[in-house]
Image (cartoon, rainbow, N blue to C red):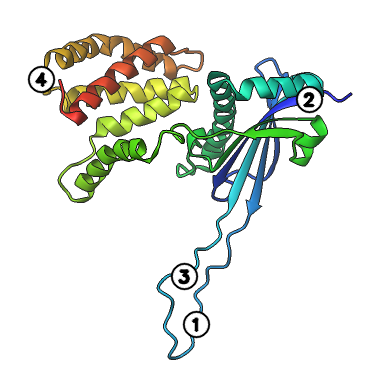
Amino acid sequence: MSTMLRLVEFDLAGPPPLNEGRYLCRSADGEPRFVLGVRALAAPSATGRKRRKKGRPESANPEPARIAITRYAVAATDPVGDSGEAAAWLERTSRDPDATEHELGVAERLINRALHAQRAAIGDPAIADISADRALVRRLGIATGEEVAAGAWSDAVEIPHPGEHGGPVRRRIAEIGPQERVAAVLGGREEVPAAVSLLGRARADFDQGRWRDSALQLVIALDAVLAEIGDTVGERQLADLAELHGLREAVGRSASAALRADGVPDTDLIGSTLQVCERVVARRRIGTA
């Protein structure tokens, strides 16, 4: 009886930023841990300019072009059991939101590890990390080794997106604030503070386990927060700003450690400092103290 592997699939819009194929991910001791599959599911249709016949108006609502879709499949190499055990695992895990998010998060970080390597290899900063929340389709499944090699699975469950069942009114309320901010920036009434962009990069690196990158981003982001948002008043805000001033030296040492080949940044310090910085920026954004 074939043993089964656990599998996560993401379908995302756009052509593959990686070459199609399968990639083996090993642990630090060289043991195989995961297999990453990358496959293009559709190619964009021809978008060349077509000549219209004389006297025939061009349609104001042309058919949208087909888009390329990339499927990422991440299979763990440690068996989950035989078909019965695997089916029970899939049923149990797909009904547990925390367990499901854990599986999706592991797959997301592995894919982004590959994309990070591709960015560095070809020097293209426009290659962005993927987000499980922004995938067109998210699946949790089980497959044999042969099915993984063929890009197939034995059984899979489609995982709904967060907030998908929250109702249109709740989603609409959540969208109003960001829409107003975008309108203000495009209308020239506001600028995006450098601290916000730098914190976003530090947070993205931290969440993907790129500790050294995050430590180096954070030390600059912290200086930007103190410079750009240091004039905000309010008891809670002033307390957080005082804490950040106190953390600055330790954050600087962590960044210096990240510059050494054998240096290990203080991940607890990075995570807690990021949270305080984000809290300060959020209060400034919504105008509370």
Residue pictured at 27% horizontal, 44% vertical: 179
Residue 111 quadrant: top right
Q: Nearer the viewer, mark 2 or mark 4?
A: 2
Amino acid type shown at disc 2: Met
Mark 2 nearby-residue class (10 Å; few <14, some 14–19, many ≥20): many
Q: Are marks 2 and 4 in contact (CB under 8 Å)?
A: no
Position of 266 with respect to 10 (left or right) is left
Mark 4 nearby-residue class (10 Å; few <14, some 14–19, many ≥20): some
Q: Nearer the viewer, mark 4 or mark 3?
A: 3
Query: Does label 1 or label 2 sit earlier along the sequence?
Result: 2
Residue 79 visible in the snapshot: no
Amino acid type shown at disc 4: Val
Residue pictured at 63% horizontal, 43% vertical: 71
Residue pictured at 66% horizontal, 36% vertical: 73
- Judging by the rendered image, the residue that carries numbered circle 1 is 51
- Judging by the rendered image, the residue that carries numbered circle 4 is 233
Q: Are marks 1 and 3 in contact (CB under 8 Å)?
A: no
Secondary structure, mark 4, is loop
Q: Which mark is residue 62?
A: 3
